Image (cartoon, grey):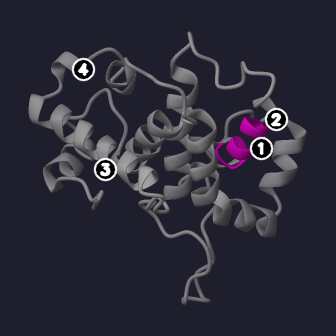
Amino acid sequence: MNQIPDPQLLAYLDSADNQYGLDHIATHGFLTATVVGKPFTNWLSALFERQQDSVPDAIKSALHAWQTAIESELKDETPIHLPFIVGDTDDTEKPMDFSPDSELSAWAVGFIDAMYADETDDWFADNDTEDDVAMLTLPMIVFSGIDEDDETLSDIRQDDDLLAQMANSLEENLTQLYLLFHQT
């Protein structure tokens, strides 16, 4: 299934009309977390800071469709398509952008927002999977910029080779998280 969202949705998410939500890159990260992680029934409310009633119905419908498309890719065992370029590029003049203003960082912020938005369901609560979840979500935590004062994370953020490895692991990590939380 093609997960390219409706152009009207993208325009809305990146416009001034979207007063409470995230831009389209961060929204993809948010939706991805709602798919790969634990069930999150009130995600729409969290995405729009409990102001979802002010969001047009067509936009909410398009968001549900986008979320379904992301989930379909994972169920079909297709690597998830990220809305930014990850990994080696043909353009050797332009290295990967790991800055706080990058699309990668925006996506990670959206992912982390969803991961921690449902206070009733901690992704790390299961002792059997806690370490796996921590390792699989470490790239998102690093790229999101949270815990800026953490020395270990700060050291990681200074190592471009390690950051590149983490960026290249995102698609596989997402698949592994999905399998971890959605075992039948």
Quadrant where the C terminus sits is: top right
10 Å crowding of disc 1: few (<14), some (14-19), many (20+): few
What kind of element bears circle 3? helix
Q: Earlier in the sequence, mark 3 or mark 2?
A: 3
Picture quadrant where residue 90 is located:
bottom right
52 displayed left or right of 142: left
Determine which residue is flagged by label 3.
69
Is there a contact, CB below 8 Å, between mark 1 and mark 2?
yes
What kind of element bears circle 4? helix
As measured in the structure, the alpha-carbon distance from the residue carrying label 4 to the one carrying label 3 is: 21 Å
Determine which residue is flagged by label 4.
52
Marker disc for residue 135: 1
23 displayed left or right of 150: left
What kind of element bears circle 1? helix
As measured in the structure, the alpha-carbon distance from the residue carrying label 1 to the one carrying label 2 is: 6 Å
Q: Residue at x 25, y 36 (%)?
A: 64
- Frontmost of labels 4 and 2 is 2
10 Å crowding of disc 4: few (<14), some (14-19), many (20+): some
- Frontmost of labels 1 and 4 is 1
Marker disc for residue 131: 2
Q: Which residues are magenta?
A: 132-140
- Frontmost of labels 1 and 3 is 3
